[in-house]
Amino acid sequence: MYCPFCRHPDTRVIDSRSTEDGAAIRRRRSCPQCGRRFTTQETVLLMVSKRSGVTEPFSRDKVIAGVRRACQGRPVGEDSLAKLGQRVEETIRATGAAEIPSHEVGLAILGPLRDLDEVAYLRFASVYRGFETLADFETEIEQLRAARTGAEG
């Protein structure tokens, strides 16, 4: 780790602690050359593998953008979208895998989105699962009704 002040190639860790959400580690460091102190934050890079074989870093913003399209015209605020994005990221990080298939990201979105807005859920699920007929929609709607009845009763 290079000192950001004098570019000395070695620094000493004084203190380490996790962030509140546990997704990163903050380290307080000291430079033996210039004596200045600074803080670094280390995060694990979570990669998503796509069907094409390409891998890219996980992006909470990309998840939120996709869900935002499904929520267009629905009474869903930006705060709710941000919370959904955080829930999805936490679910994916909880798997402990460094690389996760894009299919798993989609599955992680479906549950929180169903809780947030059923119409947006149907929109997202219809694209994600590739609904081709009215029967596909009817089946999904029946499952939503059954889940709602089970939750109420």
Image (tube, rainbow, N blue to C red):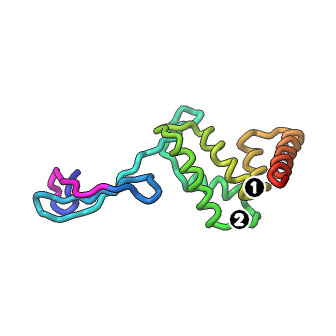
| Residues shaded magenta | 7-16
SS type, badge 2: loop
Instruction: Categorize mark 2 by other alpha carbons within 10 Å: few (<14), some (14-19), many (20+).
Output: some
Q: Are marks 2 and 1 in contact (CB under 8 Å)?
A: yes
Residue lying at 22% horizontally and 54% vertically, measured from the top left: 13
Residue 9: image location, x then y, percent: 16, 51
Measured from the top left, where is residue 149 in percent x and y?
Answer: 85, 51
Q: Residue at x 83, y 44 (%)?
A: 143
Kindly indicate the quadrant of the structure image that contains residue 8.
Answer: bottom left
Q: Is residue 133 left or right of residue 44?
A: right
* Residue type at tag 1: Ala
Q: CA distance from mark 2 to mark 1?
A: 9 Å
Q: Amino acid at mark 2?
A: Val
Q: Is residue 14 magenta?
A: yes
In this picture, residue 88 sits left or right of residue 135: left
Check residue 33 in the rendering and tell me which mark sits there, or answer none: none
Q: Which residue is mark 2?
A: 76
- The residue that mark 1 highlights is 120
List x then y, in percent, for residue 41: 34, 56
